[in-house]
């Protein structure tokens, strides 16, 4: 491909200031490269042309040009993914949605926000709150992830146990397909029974069927008040018992998270936070509840009293105010950053039926102990919805290449276990490049064939985020 010609052609289509060629003096090389990758360290970026559209029409013009000239494109959002889904490694055009971050419309009656896909998730939270509403999809990367990327990966986060996945909060989408054609799936109404609801195909499609440019998200009322309980738990089996115990109290459970002592140590080291309890424990649990008045406050203490009497914990504390809530959340939300910034990590994001979780963990622990001798395992996750984040931390004496090679040898055995216990090899991070070869552990051959046919219908030349998922 003649990158200079491509740059000039795109500049004519959408404007010179919106198109950057590598090393043209416009942008530092390291910053330029960052738009063509995500938080994975397996595949280095390798591309020459970066565009910053400001509208759906700009995106459509770029993709239409790419379709006619048979040039691949990679959509780029907040690049917070862990599956290689935003990596441009074969000279693709990178389409960054970073400048598409505006509110398009607000409906106070339906309770919706219509926004461009490049809006940072935290800013969407703020826009909703300023209008007296609440957008409940939340996770550690809200300060940098884009809402479009959240939708493209069907993001879950910390409150799925109560609010569900982002799929449950999308009313409308605007999408550009692989020909440069624009779909506008109506988000102005709740009821629209007019055939196939095609927008759901794009939710979780990781940019392989189309580029999401706008979204209409549903909003809800803010929680009345929030309280966090942080617990020290001696055995994993107790965690599931504690979760079961929460069902005995009429109190809305918003989140149920857990982490190991290894994860806690890394957060303390990275963030400089103190020990939560005087005596260390092997596991820790964070529970978040919505409370309304003194009666609910009493229920919180009843929960803590009950699990203490049943000897399910060695210590526990209820946050007394919003500042303490934030402090407790740091122990959980600081894990990914603490690991990713200081270490090379092989991430597995998996889900299991809760009733199979303990048996799976027993067999998985035996497998990892045998295969990863001397390696550290960082285990944490959204246990309330069956989602585990299983991170293998690279030893200092191994090169990245050797480390990932060893991990790749063990992954099929781990995925076989997941399949045995009726789980999924990817709960919320997606497939991307890293798990493409293992899709058959969660999808049948006929399902994969159908997915390929759908891909062909929306992207006949295969130019959208090539090599990802399928």
Image (spheres, grey):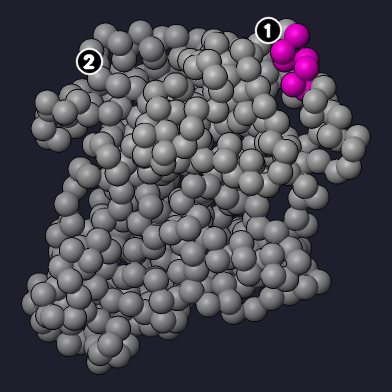
Name which of mark 2 and mark 1 comes first in the sequence: 1
Question: How far across and down, in percent of the image, does residue 377 sit?
Answer: 34, 22
The answer to whether residue 412 shows anywhere in this view is no
Identify the image quadrant of residue 132: bottom right
**Quarter the N terminus occupies:** bottom left
Which residue is at 69% across, 65% downward?
A: 129
- Tell me which corner region of the image, top left, top right, bottom left or bottom right, holds residue 430: top left
Between marks 2 and 1 in the image, the one whose residue lies nearer the viewer: 1
Coordinates of residue 309 in the picture (x, y in percent) = 75, 9
Q: Residue at x 14, y 35 (%)?
A: 400
Residue furthest to the left in view is 2
Q: Which residues are magenta?
A: 303-309
In space, the residues marked 2 and 1 are separated at their CA atoms by 32 Å
Q: Is residue 241 magenta?
A: no
Q: For this rendering, which residue is in front, 321 or 371?
A: 321
Q: Position of residue 181 (x, y in %)?
A: 42, 76
Which residue is label 1 attached to? 311
* Residue pictured at 36% horizontal, 34% vertical: 269
Give the left or right position of residue 94, taking residue 298 as reference. left
- Decide if residue 458 is on the left or right side of residue 287: left
- Residue drawn 25% across and 61% down? 34
Asked if residue 232 shows in the view, the reply is yes
Q: Which mark is residue 374?
A: 2
- Local secondary structure at mark 2: loop
Q: Which mark is residue 88?
A: none
Q: Front-most of 245 and 201?
A: 245
**Residue 4, placed above or below residue 227:** below
Q: Is residue 126 above or below residue 60?
A: above
């Amino acid at each position: 491909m003649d990158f200079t010609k491509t740059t000039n052609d795109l500049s004519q289509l959408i404007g010179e200031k919106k198109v950057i060629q590598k090393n043209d003096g416009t942008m530092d090389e390291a910053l330029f490269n960052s738009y063509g990758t995500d938080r994975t360290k397996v595949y280095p970026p390798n591309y020459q042309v970066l565009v910053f559209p400001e509208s759906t029409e700009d995106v459509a013009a770029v993709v239409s040009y790419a379709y006619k000239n048979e040039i691949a494109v990679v959509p780029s959002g907040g690049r917070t993914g862990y599956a290689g889904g935003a990596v441009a490694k074969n000279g693709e055009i990178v389409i960054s949605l970073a400048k598409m971050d505006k509110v398009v419309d607000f409906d106070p009656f339906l309770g919706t926000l219509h926004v461009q896909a490049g809006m940072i998730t935290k800013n969407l939270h703020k826009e909703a709150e300023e209008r007296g509403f609440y957008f409940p999809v939340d996770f550690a990367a809200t300060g940098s992830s884009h809402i479009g990327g959240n939708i493209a990966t069907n993001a879950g986060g910390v409150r799925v146990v109560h609010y569900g996945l982002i799929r449950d909060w999308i009313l409308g989408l605007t999408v550009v397909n692989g020909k440069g054609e624009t779909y506008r799936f109506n988000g102005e109404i709740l009821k629209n029974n007019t055939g196939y609801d095609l927008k759901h195909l794009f939710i979780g499609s990781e940019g392989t069927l189309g580029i999401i440019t706008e979204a209409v998200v549903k909003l809800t009322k803010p929680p009345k008040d929030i309280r966090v309980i942080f617990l020290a738990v001696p055995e994993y089996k107790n965690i599931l018992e504690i979760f079961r115990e929460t069902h005995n109290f009429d109190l809305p459970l918003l989140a149920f998270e857990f982490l190991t002592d290894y994860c806690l140590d890394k957060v303390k080291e990275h963030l400089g936070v103190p020990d939560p309890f005087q005596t260390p424990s092997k596991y820790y649990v964070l529970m978040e509840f919505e409370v309304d008045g003194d009666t609910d406050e009493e229920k919180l203490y009843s929960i803590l009293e009950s699990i203490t009497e049943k000897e399910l914990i060695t210590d526990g504390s209820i946050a007394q105010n919003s500042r303490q809530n934030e402090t407790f959340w740091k122990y959980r939300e600081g894990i990914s950053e603490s690991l990713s910034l200081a270490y090379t990590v092989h991430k597995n994001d998996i889900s299991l039926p809760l009733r199979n979780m303990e048996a799976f963990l027993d067999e998985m622990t035996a497998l990892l102990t045998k295969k990863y001798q001397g390696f550290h395992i960082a285990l944490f996750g959204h246990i309330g919805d069956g989602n585990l984040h299983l991170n293998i931390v690279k030893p200092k004496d191994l090169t990245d290449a050797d480390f990932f090679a060893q991990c790749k040898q063990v992954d099929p055995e781990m995925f076989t276990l997941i399949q045995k216990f009726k789980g999924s090899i990817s709960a919320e991070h997606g497939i991307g490049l890293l798990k493409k070869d293992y899709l058959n552990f969660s999808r049948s051959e006929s399902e994969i064939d159908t997915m390929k046919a759908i891909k062909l219908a929306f992207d006949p030349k295969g130019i959208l985020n090539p090599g990802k998922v399928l």
